[in-house]
Image (tube, grey):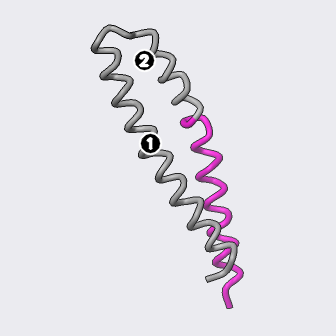
């Protein structure tokens, strides 16, 4: 496995972890909102928007690294 492919795989796993944590935090924000803390839930959702905004860039970078890693194989 090339270094580039290894890095692409590493970033892919980190991205999967980020998505899982984002989903878990979203569930917690829903739970908090149901218990009357709408302001806190909205703040959490605002922070989660940053994850969503970066998702396209992260996926594009992973795809480019994966292609570069495939091209680097002999």
In the image, which residues are magenta? 51-74
Instruction: From this view, report whether residue 43 is shown above or below residue 11.
Output: above
Instruction: From this view, report whether residue 37 is shown above or below residue 54.
Output: above
What residue appears at the point 45 percent right and 14 percent down from the top-left corner?
Answer: 40
Q: Which mark is residue 12?
A: none
Residue 28 in the image, given as x and y percentages of width and height: 35, 28
Instruction: Decide whether residue 71 is among the magenta residues.
Output: yes
Q: Quadrant of the C terminus?
A: bottom right
- Near mark 2 (Cα within 10 A), the count class, few <14, some 14-19 or many ≥20, is many
Instruction: From this view, report whether residue 56 is shown above or below residue 6.
Output: above
Q: How many marks?
A: 2
What residue appears at the point 39 percent right and 38 percent down from the top-left corner?
Answer: 23
* Badge 2 or badge 1: first in the primary sequence: 1
Quarter assignment of residue 52: top right
Instruction: Decide whether residue 8 is among the magenta residues.
Output: no
* SS assignment at label 1: helix
* SS assignment at label 2: helix
Tell whether label 1 touches label 2 (CB within 8 Å).
no
What residue appears at the point 70 percent right and 72 percent down from the top-left corner?
Answer: 68
25 relative to 69 in the view: left or right: left
Query: Could you say which is closer to the camera, residue 2 or residue 74?
Result: 2
Quarter assignment of residue 3: bottom right
Estimate the spatial distance between the alpha carbons at disc 2 and disc 1, rounded to whole Å.
Answer: 16 Å
**Which SS does the magenta portion mostly show?**
helix
Residue 1 in the image, given as x and y percentages of width and height: 61, 83
Q: Which mark is residue 21?
A: 1
Residue 2 in the image, given as x and y percentages of width and height: 66, 81
Q: Which residue is mark 2?
A: 41
Instruction: From this view, report whether residue 13 is shown above or below residue 52.
Output: below
């Amino acid at each position: 496995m090339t270094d580039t492919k290894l890095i692409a795989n590493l970033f892919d796993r980190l991205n999967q972890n980020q998505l899982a944590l984002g989903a878990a935090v979203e569930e917690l924000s829903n739970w908090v909102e149901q218990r009357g803390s709408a302001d806190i839930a909205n703040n959490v959702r605002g922070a989660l928007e940053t994850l969503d905004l970066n998702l396209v860039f992260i996926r594009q970078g992973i795809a480019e690294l994966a292609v570069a890693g495939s091209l680097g194989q002999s």
